[in-house]
Image (spheres, rainbow, N blue to C red):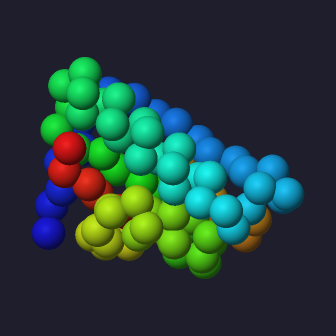
Amino acid sequence: MTVELRPLVAADAEAVHPWARGQGVAVEAVRLICDVLRTGKIGRRAAIRVEPENLASVRVAQQAGFRYVRDFPSNRDTLPDGTPTTFSLYLLDL
């Protein structure tokens, strides 16, 4: 399956302070960002790229309504041993 993500319109990274984790803060932030993109007609699709072992980020993508598409090796990020980092791709139609 080929998924075209170009052109990239916006990029964002999320971090939640430990005291706020598990309260839906990241999910709500992702939903609000998607609402801004949708309302402003900025793109047709949102993508989330996560490391599959980062279960908190996987849950955020799923709970925000994104669907899993596939895993893929990074062409920029590497593990300490030099092998490419594997990412999971999640998409949401706006």
Q: Quadrant of the C terminus?
A: top left
Tell me, yes or no, if residue 7 can be seen here: no
The quadrant the N terminus occupies is bottom left
Q: How many marks?
A: 0
Choose top left, top right, bottom left or bottom right for residue 72.
Answer: bottom left
User: Relative to 28, is 45 on the left or the right?
Assistant: left
Question: Whole-percent x and y of residue 7?
Answer: 24, 31
**Residue 75 pos. (x, y %):** 46, 52
Left or right of 35 in this view: 32? right
Whether residue 91 is situated above or below residue 1 in the rendered picture = above
Q: Is residue 85 above or below residue 27?
A: below
Q: Is residue 71 visible?
A: yes
- Asked whether 25 or 68 is in front, the reply is 25
- Residue in the picture at 30% in, 31% down: 37
Q: Residue 58 placed where, x, y %?
A: 51, 70
Identify which residue, 88 or 78, lies in the foreground: 88
* Quarter assignment of residue 22: bottom right
| Residue drawn at the location 51% of the way across and 64% of the way down | 60
Looking at the image, is 55 positioned above or below residue 16? below
Q: Which residue occupies the foreground of this view, 32 or 60? A: 32
Rendered view: 40 above or below 21? above
Furthest toward the front, the residue is: 23
Residue pictured at 41% horizontal, 69% vertical? 62
Residue 31 in the figure: left or right of residue 46: right
Return the residue found at the far right. Answer: 19
